[in-house]
Amino acid sequence: MEPLIAYLLGLAVAVALVTATWLVQLATHDAGVVDAVWSATLGLLGLLYAAVGDAPAPVRLLLAVMAGAWAFRLAAHLALRMRGRPEDARYAAARRAWGRRADLYMLLFFWFQAVVAWVLSLPFLVIAYRPDMPAAGWLAAAGIVWLVSVAGEALADRQLERFRRDPANAGRVCDRGLWRYSRHPNYFFECLHWLAYPLLAAGAPYWWATLASPAIMAWLLLRVSGIPTVESAEGKSRRIGYDDYVRRTSAFIPLPPKRN
């Protein structure tokens, strides 16, 4: 299959998945499920490109493992976190603001999510169609970055969930483990994860196009839907001691905490 056809097929798959998710949320009135589906969609696109690409089999197998393991772990984490809880406050607020047109606007937003996932999947496509094996150094670097980032994100997620499950921590700030060194270690490792794919694509035709995904993800998490949402005035007000936590803790890159 030609790369362009594979990429357009990826767009069709992404749109179909989020449209099905939209139909489900019409019945459940819980649009937050799209977050887990969005992550899973990226994993499926990685598997799709690995299946139809013409890169050497070891490269496509590695791509499938890297994209799939990262995406499905994150999707499972998000799905478990949402289970038994009311609709995410972001989507509930949007539903109230949109009124009678909420269902239509939610569908448009879901389609936008599909397009973002499709754009971010470009490194998977470039890797799946590279004509040769990457150099050993690039291969090792990609593997190390991927292992460190996925393990770090999983650890940060687990530490935060363990903290939240303790009733004694209700309304308090998690400043334990990785969260002692960064206010958003999960976002840091998520951004780091996307740098593994340019390393794996190094030397391939159009490898430079893979740099767009890390940049887009960093922009989204730092400026749009990540840190700005969590650190909004409303978000800060729900947690005791958050202002002090902000003063002593790095916002993104894990660093030793500042002394008061």
Image: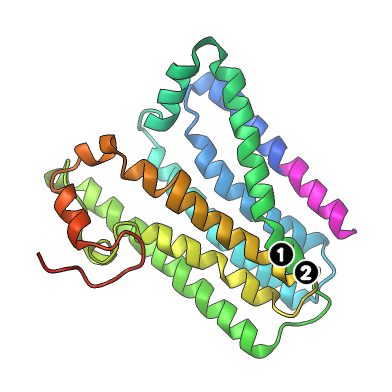
Q: Which residue is mark 1?
A: 209
Q: Mark 1 falls on what kind of element?
A: helix
- At horizontal 39% and vertical 58% (from top left) the residue drawn is 186
- Check disc 2: other Cα within 10 Å, few if <14, some if 14-19, many if 20+: few
> In this rendering, would 240 be left or right of 26?
left
**Three-letter amino acid code of the residue under disc 1:** Ala
Q: Mark 2 falls on what kind of element?
A: loop
Q: Position of residue 235 (x, y in %)?
A: 28, 39
> In this rendering, would 217 be left or right of 160?
right
Q: Looking at the image, is 89 positioned above or below residue 127?
A: above
The magenta segment is 2-13
Mark on residue 65?
none
**Three-letter amino acid code of the residue under disc 2:** Tyr
> In this rendering, would 240 be left or right of 32?
left
Residue 238 shows in this picture: no
Q: Quadrant of residue 22?
A: top right
Q: How many marks?
A: 2
Circles 1 and 2 in contact, beta carbons < 8 Å: yes
Work out which quarter of the rendered image holds the N terminus and state it: bottom right
Between the C-alphas of marks 1 and 2, the distance is 6 Å
Magenta span contains residue 3: yes
Q: Nearer the viewer, residue 224 or 3?
A: 224
Q: Nearer the viewer, residue 219 or 239?
A: 219
Magenta: main secondary structure? helix
